[in-house]
Image (cartoon, grey):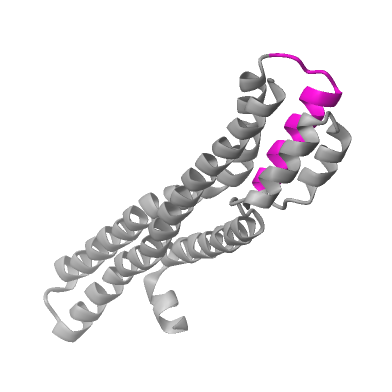
Amino acid sequence: MLYYIKAGGPILYVLLILSVVSLGVIFERSLCFIKNKTSVDSMFKKEIKELLIDGKYNEAIEFSKKEKGVVGKTLTKFLIRYCLVGDYKNSDELLREIELEEMDILERNTYILGIIAYTAPMIGLLGTVTGMIQAFGKIAVSGTGDPNAIAGGISQALLTTAGGLIIAIPSIIAYNIFNKKIEKMSLEVEKIATFIVNIVKR
């Protein structure tokens, strides 16, 4: 492995850094999504509906805090600002504002995966092109020489393209999976949020 890294030259070191960043983002975002469950059961809806109808806003806030993840955070912020602080702007507008705040947390750093997925193959290709230029430059200076040496130089040049693809493939897979999860979470939050708004508007 160390031989291939050295053979790939400076470009492969750049790709190695990108791979570490990509793995770090994938790990960090995976933990974030594990912590942020979205689905809520019917008992939660029933309990919080009763508390809000009875005007027990403090109890409703404490109850919503027990619901872990983005749903609980969104509802808690909304109930505090709308029912206690008296942030009486349009409830739909307020809720949308809070939703965007929470979605921004979920989307954090995912763009990095998109950038890496797009740039890693390009960087790898750049390494291959520069490697091929060097290999053919040697041929032009010294003649065909040893075919094995030439083949070795070309194979080393191709290492960076392979490295770029190896990094890009898992990055683009993770990027798409995370975006799908964000879409799903956004829909779930919107459903429960609409349910709550309809209650407090009564």
Q: Is residue 46 left or right of residue 61?
A: left
The residue located at (66%, 46%) in the rendering is 70
Q: Is residue 95 left or right of residue 58?
A: left
Q: Is residue 146 visible?
A: no
Q: Is residue 7 left or right of residue 48?
A: left
Confirm whether the magenta stretch covers residue 88.
yes
- Report the quarter where the C terminus lies: top right
Extreme left residue here?
A: 144
Extreme top residue here?
A: 89
Give the image location of residue 4, x and y in percent: 39, 79
Q: Is residue 164 left or right of residue 198?
A: left
Q: Is residue 185 above or below residue 168?
A: above
For this rendering, which residue is in front, 102 or 156? 102
For this rendering, which residue is in front, 77 or 84? 84
Give the image location of residue 191, x and y in percent: 55, 37
The residue located at (44%, 75%) in the rendering is 5
Q: How many marks?
A: 0
- Report the quarter where the N terminus lies: bottom left
Q: Is residue 136 visible?
A: yes
The residue range painted magenta reads: 70-89
Give the image location of residue 17, x and y in percent: 52, 62
Confirm whether the magenta stretch covers residue 77.
yes
Most common secondary structure along the magenta stretch? helix
The residue located at (42%, 66%) in the rendering is 12
Q: Is residue 9 above or below residue 88?
A: below
For this rendering, which residue is in front, 84 or 28? 84
Q: Is residue 179 above or below residue 148?
A: above
For this rendering, which residue is in front, 26 or 67? 67
